[in-house]
Image: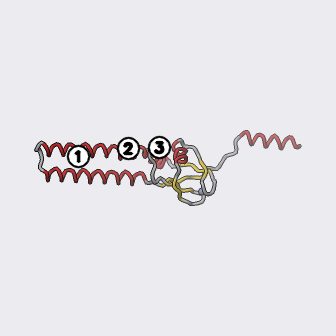
Amino acid sequence: MTVAIGIKGHCAHCDITFELKPWQLNAIAIEEPFDCPYCQWVLRLNCPRQLRQFKSLDHWALVRPSMVVLTCVVLMVVLVAEWVGLISVIGQFNVSLVVLLVHFLALRYARYRQRITLDLQVVTPALPIEQLARIACARLSQH
Ligand SMILES: [Zn+2]
């Protein structure tokens, strides 16, 4: 994860929504279960749709740096066009204004897409086979 802002998790057990820490986001990214900070139950993201949404967050994080580059290039091109007399001062002003508007709208939309709440399901820990076998052996040896 490069940038993670405003990603929240909702615990299905204690019904609390909390801000996810970077290590919890990493756990979700590698599909590993982790403890709920409030009720200590083991949680994991089971919904495939939300998992896909979560994994596409990296792309949205790239919107900001690429928009900064794009906006700077367009503003410079427009400035040069005005200097060499291709467009008027008013024209240059209008184009710059539209570019800045598009820039902020794109950032706003990217931030909106990054703000998600993940529904974390409780993982019921299944007893490992070895542990069951050990319990069975202990019971047998008692007789
Ligand atoms: Zn919980």
Quarter residue 116 falls in: bottom left
Dot 1 crowding, Cα within 10 Å, few <14, some 14–19, many 20+: some
Label 3 element class: loop
- Count of numbered circles in the view: 3
Q: Badges 1 and 2: C-beta atoms under 8 Å apart?
A: no
Residue 9 is situated, as x and y percent measured from the top left of the image, at: 52, 54
Q: Which is nearer the eye, 63 or 79? A: 79
Residue 97 is situated, as x and y percent measured from the top left of the image, at: 22, 53
Q: Badges 3 and 2: C-beta atoms under 8 Å apart?
A: no
Alpha-carbon distance for marks 1 and 3?
31 Å
Residue, disc 3: 1
Locate ligand 1 by image quadrant.
bottom right
Point out the frontmost of discs 1 and 3.
1
Residue 52 is situated, as x and y percent measured from the top left of the image, at: 45, 45
Alpha-carbon distance for marks 3 and 2?
11 Å
Residue 60 lies left or right of residue 84; in this view the side is right
Label 2 element class: loop
Q: Amino acid at mark 1?
A: Leu
Q: Amino acid at mark 2?
A: Leu
Locate the C terminus and report the quarter of the image it occupies: top right
Residue, disc 1: 75
Q: Amino acid at mark 3?
A: Met
Residue, disc 2: 62
Dot 3 crowding, Cα within 10 Å, few <14, some 14–19, many 20+: few
Label disc, if present, on residue 48 of the rendered structure: none
Task: Please tell me which residue is depicted at 48% across the width and 55% down the height of the picture.
Answer: 117
Point out the frontmost of discs 1 and 2.
1
